[in-house]
Image (cartoon, rainbow, N blue to C red):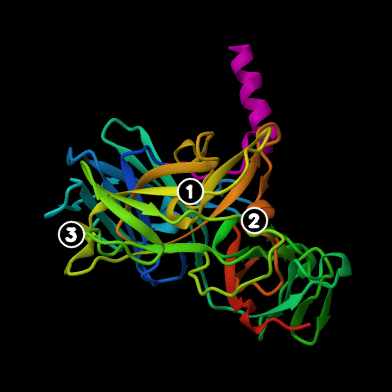
Amino acid sequence: MEKNFYSILLLLLFPTIILSQVEEVSPPDFIKTIKFKSNTTQGQLPILKLGEPLVLEFDALNANEEDFYYVIEHFNFDWTPSILVKGEYIRGLDNQRILEYYNSFNTYQVYSHYKLKIPNIQTRGLLKSGNYMISIYDEYDELMFSRKFMIYEDLVNVGVRVKRSRDVKVIAEKQSIDMVVATNSINFNNPLETIKTLIIQNNNLNTSIDNLKPQYTLGNELIYRYDTESAFWGGNEYFWFENKDVRTSNVGVQFIDLKDIYQSYLYANIPRTGRPYTYNPDLNGNFQVTAADRLDTDVEADYTMVHFSLLQEELKDKDIYVYGNFNAFAIEPLTKMIFNSENGNYEASFRLKQGFYNYKYVVVDRKTRELDEGAISGDYWQTENNYKVLVYYRDLGARFDKLIGYGEASSVDISN
């Protein structure tokens, strides 16, 4: 009894010791094509305006017509759990079964397509801005996967400009982000402490830059013009392929074959680091499901086994992964490439739904797990990248971080 008393007292006195940043959980191999379709047709990071509907879709390839349940949680700016209770940020209930699903039609790969819309009968809406995570559980209460999303209020104007790096050592390889937050008529208390920012390159939260402080105030504007702190590696344009017609080769697809399902063999790629930059329009790592001669791609688009190949000498103490938003930029065994000593290539194969896909190759150190996006692709200041800036605010004494503004820019308009 005495031990329990001191345990409870410790938790009350030091609550931060049990708070940790939450990370997304990757799905098992039979769950594919997770995407939000709320305000875009592309599979990308969902950033929604407060009041906009949320639509989450995914496929289960085991054809068991399983029951899945969803749980929605609210988080602070730093992705630690907020202290809000469910009733403060959800109108209605979560932990409900996903009622809408359809079985695939006329496909080699049998699957069930699940669709969750919010608002719905059980969950009538989300009430607060900020960071959220939606988690999907099976009928045995086992976590299948989780995905982050953000909801913002349009309270401040966020200006974003992309500049070449101000550091001459990396001026040819990096891009820097300047920001201006116009507070309008809102009087923010101590913005150095209450305002927080997040800069996201190409919808990838793994490489985001967070919590930069405004350097100075000009009238009703907060100015951010850092030399190095807001700089990103430029990277390179993504490789891409399209297999909307599974019966014939298409852009990026060298040839196809039919076994149990269609096999799409992509052209072998070469490392581009050290080579001259070449502009090649892409989706900045995103993907889009498309299928020729199919009315409803949700259930009529087929899955193909996509074979990737990279002409790269074997690396010591490092691994190479296929990288993109098709799996939320996760480093997982499914996308790890294997070196084929017979032909001297790195190879990987996994199932993807028909569509248009962006991808690149990244190197991960086996010991430190440090990821290097530019080791294979190179880094160039000319690369067309998308940047999103999120502005959070927690007033003195407030209980959660509001997401009060959202801005976006492309490095197409990069300047010196």
Q: Nearer the viewer, mark 3 or mark 2?
A: 3
Mark 2 crowd level (few <14, some 14–19, many ≥20, 10 Å Cα): some
Mark 1 or mark 2: name the one nearer the start of the chain.
Answer: 2
**Residue linked to disc 2:** 207
Point 58% across, 76% down: residue? 408
Mark 1 crowd level (few <14, some 14–19, many ≥20, 10 Å Cα): many
Secondary structure under tag 2 reads: strand
Q: Main secondary structure of the magenta part?
A: helix
Residue 127, x across and y down, in percent: 43, 64
Q: Is residue 2 left or right of residue 62?
A: right
Q: Nearer the viewer, mark 1 or mark 2?
A: 1
> The magenta stretch spans which residues?
1-26
Q: CA distance from mark 1 to mark 2?
A: 25 Å
Point 82% across, 65% down: residue? 170
Question: Quadrant of residue 183 in the image?
Answer: bottom right
**Residue linked to disc 1:** 309
CB within 8 Å, label 1 to label 2: no
Type of residue at label 3?
A: Glu
For the N terminus, the quadrant is: top right
> Residue 406 or 61: which is nearer the viewer?
61
Residue 263, x across and y down, in percent: 29, 48
Type of residue at label 1?
A: Ser
Question: Quadrant of residue 291 in the image?
Answer: bottom left
Secondary structure under tag 3 reads: helix
Say the numbered circle drawn on residue 350.
none
**Residue linked to disc 3:** 300
